[in-house]
Amino acid sequence: MPASMLYSLILTAGVHGLANGLDGAGRGGASADVSDDDLRAISITPQAGMMSARNTNKRLLRIQQHAKTKTPRQEMTVQLYVLSTHKPSSQARISALTPVLHKLGFPYQVYYGVDKHDYANQAEEMNQQILPMTDSMKKEWLQADFGDSKSIPNGKTPESTPPIGALACTLGHHHIWNLTSQSQSDKQDEWTIILEDDAKLNPRVADAADAIRSILASAPSDVHLIHFDDRHCEGRVGVLDARNIDRWAPGTTAYAVTPHGARMLLSEPFRFGADHYLNVPVLHGKIKAFCPEGLHIFLHTYDHASTMNSMSLYQRDV
């Protein structure tokens, strides 16, 4: 990600909407406990062509009850966070994104950040108190490497280095990972979707909510990070692991992470820009990521005034 997302974040009030078909916690109903032994105990007897097993009737009753109460995978808990700033251009993007968020139907919260220009240098930015950095985070950030640049150029100090939007951006995503990690679940029954405010819903996706739920429900069981944007998965489909991950693949525009995935992200030192941070626990074999087949749900590669301050083909300073 080009340096300059401005995210050291403040939580706005209110959670908007609830996922369709879920209860107030975003969960489905209770499910009966049916073991593999229950299923294996039922067999077809070739001689009689009838079902026979020890305690078959009792087990069948349990399975019938289970079929009525089992929570379908697509009714997992899904929450959504949007990262933004107080800049007028960001506010305009939030206004445009709000109808999309309501249509998706997931409970969501918007976090607003501060402009990096509020700081005279990177030392002030590191010492801000909106999302305070620990001493270890500050020490690790001094070694941050973005591939083509570093957080603190050689021969410079934080006091002599301009404030950097990449730090504010990374602090924002890091904070959401902290919130997500508070759940004790290690399974795929809880997902947090994280969007940056310039994420644009792909107009070619007919039903984005259904597409997202389908992707989350069908992801391989060992996947804990799913990319929904058009940059991180450009030219890629399927599971990403330590063997095929691109260390410098960019893009934190739109992705989903489980609590376990968030904990693995947090287990890495704080010396990566948010874009590349997503690749690190995958590179180290802690989790696997996933690039879905078909249309990308969200787009970043369109002509727009990005929150980023660096110029590129798709981004303009505002």
Image (cartoon, rainbow, N blue to C red):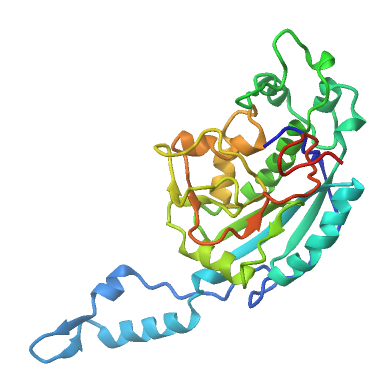
- The number of discs equals 0
- Is 291 above or below relative to 61? above
- In the figure, residue 137 lies in which quadrant? top right
Q: Residue at x 48, y 48 (%)?
A: 236
- Is 160 above or below relative to 98? above
Residue 276 visible at all = yes
- Is 219 above or below relative to 305? below
Q: Is residue 147 left or right of residue 310?
A: left
Residue 159 x/y as whole percent:
84, 15
Residue 308 x/y as whole percent:
78, 39
Residue 191 x/y as whole percent:
59, 57
- Is 90 above or below relative to 56? above
- In the figure, residue 16 lies in which quadrant? bottom right
Q: Residue at x 51, y 62 (%)?
A: 294
Nearest to the observer: residue 297 or residue 183: 297
Residue 27 visible at all = no
Q: Residue furthest top?
A: 155
Residue 241 x/y as whole percent:
43, 42
Q: Residue at x 25, y 83 (%)?
A: 55
**Which quadrant: the N terminus?**
top right
Q: Is residue 158 left or right of residue 204?
A: right
- In the figure, residue 248 lies in which quadrant? top right
Nearest to the observer: residue 63 or residue 174: 174
Q: Residue furthest front?
A: 313
**Which quadrant: the C terminus?**
top right
